[in-house]
Image (cartoon, coloured by chain):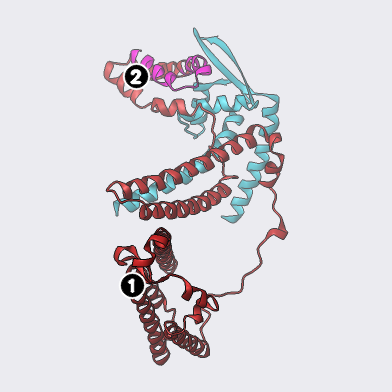
Amino acid sequence: MELLDRYLEAVKKQLPWERQDDIVAELRANLEAQLDDKQEELGHTLTAEEAKAWVGQLPPPAIMAGRYRRQQYLIGPGLFPIYWLILRMVTFWVFICTAIVNGIRLFTQPWSAAAVPGAIVDVAFVVLLNAAIITVIFAAIEYALLHHPEWIPQVAQQTSKWDLNALPQIEPATQGKKRTRAHTIIEAAAHTLMLCWLLLLPKYPVLILGPGAFIVYALPYTLAPIIMTFYWAVVALNVVQLVWKLVDLYTGAWMGERKLERFAIKLMGIIPILIALRAPGKMWVVLKDPAAEFVKYGAQLAQINQAIYIGLRIVLIITVITFALEIGNWFLQSYRRSLKSAA
Amino acid sequence: MGYSMTVAENQFENLRLELRRGCLTLAVLAQLKQEHYGYTLRKALASQGLEIDESTLYPLLRRLETQGLLTSEWREEEKRNKRFYRLSGDGEAIFARLLDEWNAINLAIGNIL
C-alpha cells in the first residue's frame, strides 16, 4: 500500500541511521500483519478512504521514530539540582559584575545613541555565554558518569554520598526581632552627634583631614563652590534622616520594619551625588591663584578633576545598582510572602 | 473553567502514563515466556486487557533486547519475514525478581487502600 510505504519512509528518515533498515523491516512486518487483520475483519481490501483512515490512526512518524532513540538526559536528575544551583549563582554574579562594568563604561565614555542597547546586548551575551559553558560542562559530567564513571570516580561517589558533618548549623532566628526603644534613642543620639560633626567641618577641616589639614592648606588648590552645595545637600539629608528618626520615636513607628524610610533615605542619598556631578566645567578643585599657578599646576588640576569625575560616576552607579537590588529583593520577598499566605 | 479541566486532565494523563510505564515492561516480559513477534504480542496483551500503542511496544521490545532481557530472530512466516522475540536467560531471572517486586507492591497497595 503506497500510503504505508510513505509512512514507513517518513519514519525511516528520523531513525538512528545505523538501525534504519532493520527497524523499518520489522515495523513493516508488524503493520502489514495489522493491515491483513483489518482487511480480514472488513472482508475486502481497504479502499482509498479506508486506507487513509487506517494509516492516519497510526502514531505520528516523528513519535514512532523518536521512541526508538535511546532515552537520554542532557543533565540527569541526579546532577540537575547541583547544576541548577551553580547556574543560578554564577549567572547572578556574572550579571551583576557585567552590569557594573558596562554601567561604568557607559558613564565614562562619550555618549552615543547606540551605547545603552549595546551595553544591554553585551550583558546579555556574557550571561548567556556563561550559562552555556556551565551547561556544557555539566552535560559532559553527565555523559562521563553514565558511560565512563571510572574517569571521574570522585564525582561518581559524591553524587550518591553526602557528609553529615557538612550540614549547616541552625541559624538563630533574626526575622521578627523587635528593635528596642533604647536602641532607637541611641541611634538618634549618635545621628545628632554626627550632624554636629558635619556642621563643624567647614570651620574645622582638621575634624576630617586630621593633621593632613595643614598640608592641604599649603597646596595651591582649593575646593570649588559646588563642594559647598554638595556639603549642604549632605547636611540636609542628615537633618531629614534625624527628623524622621525623632518622629518615629515620638509616634512609635520605630517598632516597625521602616523599609519605606530606608528606601527613601537611600534614594535621597543619590541627590548630593547628582548635585556634585553638575559642577560647572566639571571642576571640583580649583587653583587658589589661577593667573599665577595655571601654567605650573594646570595639567595636574585637570587630572585631579577628571579622577573626581570618574569617582563620582562610579559611586553613582554603585549606589543606583545597590538601591535597585534592594528594591528588587524587597519585591521578591513580598511576592514570596504573598504566595505563602495564599497557600 | 475549561482551562482548569484541561490542566486536570493533563495532570491525570501524566500520572496515568507514569503508572503504566513500569507495568508495561513486566507485562511484556510475562507474555514473552512464549515466543511472539511484535503484532501478535500486541494482540495477546490487548486480549488480556492491556492495550499498548505501536509506538510504545515495538521500541520497548528493541530496548529490552538491547538490555539483554530478550533474544530475537528473523524468520519467514506466511511469506513474510518477521522478528520473533522471547525471554533470554537473563530476562527470565529479571522477570522473576520483578514479579516478586510487583506482588509485594500489589499487597502493600491493597493494604493501604
Residue A171 horizontal/vertical position (percent): 62, 70
Residue B86 horizontal/vertical position (percent): 62, 22
Quick one: SS at disc 1?
A: helix
Q: Quadrant of the N terminus of chain A?
A: top left
Residue at image location 32% in from the left, 70% down from the top? A275
A283 with respect to A326 (left or right): left
Q: CA distance from mark 2 to mark 1?
A: 98 Å
Disc with the residue nearer the chain's start (2 vs 1):
2
- Within the image, what quadrant is residue A56 found in? top left
Q: Which chain is red?
A: A
The magenta span reads A2-27
Is residue A83 among what the camera can see?
Answer: yes
Looking at the picture, which amino acid does disc 2 mark?
Answer: Leu
Share a chain, discs 2 and 1?
Answer: yes
Which of discs 2 and 1 lies nearer the camera? The answer is 1
**Is residue A223 within the magenta segment?**
no
- Residue closest to the eye, A107 or A41: A107
The kind of secondary structure the magenta stretch mainly shows is helix
Residue designated by label 1: A226
Could you classify mark 2 by the number of other residues whose Cα lies within 10 Å: few (under 14), some (14-19), or many (20 or more)?
few
Residue at image location 69% in from the left, 34% down from the top? A151
- Residue closest to the eye, A193 or A76: A193
